[in-house]
Image: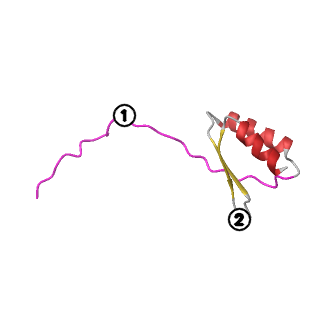
Amino acid sequence: KEQELREFCRTNPYVLHFIQQIGDCKIELELEVKDFDQYNSVVDQMRQKFKKYIRNIEVIVIKKQRFKGVPFDIGYIEH
């Protein structure tokens, strides 16, 4: 089943990284999705296909933000 999971991740366009670890969390995946619905769709597919092997899922959400310019002028200070 591990090879099937690797293949699932390799062919899924939303999975960026598959990291195999030592310890309680054996596998870490990095996904890039447009919204939470898309994330749930990927996780639901994995849960359905690999339900005997997935005990729990922990999530960390990283929101990418972009700024146009600096909101204030830093300027140069002479001492």
Figure quadrant of residue 71: top left
Q: Quadrant of residue 34?
A: top right
- The residue nearer to you, when weighing 72 against 24, is 24
Instruction: Determine the secondary structure under disc 2.
Output: loop
Residue at 79% in and 46% down? 5
Q: Which labelled disc corresponds to residue 4?
A: none
Helix, strand or loop: magenta stretch:
loop
- Mark 2 / mark 1, whichever is N-terminal: 2
Q: Is residue 48 left or right of residue 10?
A: right
- Magenta segment: 53-79
The quadrant holding residue 37 is: top right
Please name the residue that numbered disc 2 is placed on: 22
59 in magenta: yes
Q: Position of residue 66 (x, y in %)?
A: 44, 37
User: Residue tagged by mark 1?
Assistant: 68
Mark 2 surroundings: few (<14), some (14-19) or many (≥20) residues within 10 A: few
Q: Residue furthest left?
A: 79
Residue at image location 82% in from the left, 52% down from the top:
54
Spatial distance from mark 2 to mark 1, Cα to Cα?
Answer: 41 Å
Question: x%, y% of residue 52?
Answer: 88, 51
Q: Is residue 69 left or right of residue 22?
A: left
Q: Amino acid at mark 2?
A: Ile
Residue at position x 61%, y 39% in the image: 32
Disc 1 residue crowd, few under 14, some 14–19, many 20+, Cα 10 Å: few
Callout 1: SS:
loop
| Identity, as a three-letter code, of the amino acid under mark 1 | Lys
Point out residue 15 in the picture as x, y percentages from the top left corner: 67, 41
Left-right relation of 34 to 49: left
Q: Residue at x 80, y 48 (%)?
A: 3
Query: From the image, which quarter does the C terminus lie in?
Result: bottom left
Q: Nearer the viewer, residue 30 or 9?
A: 9
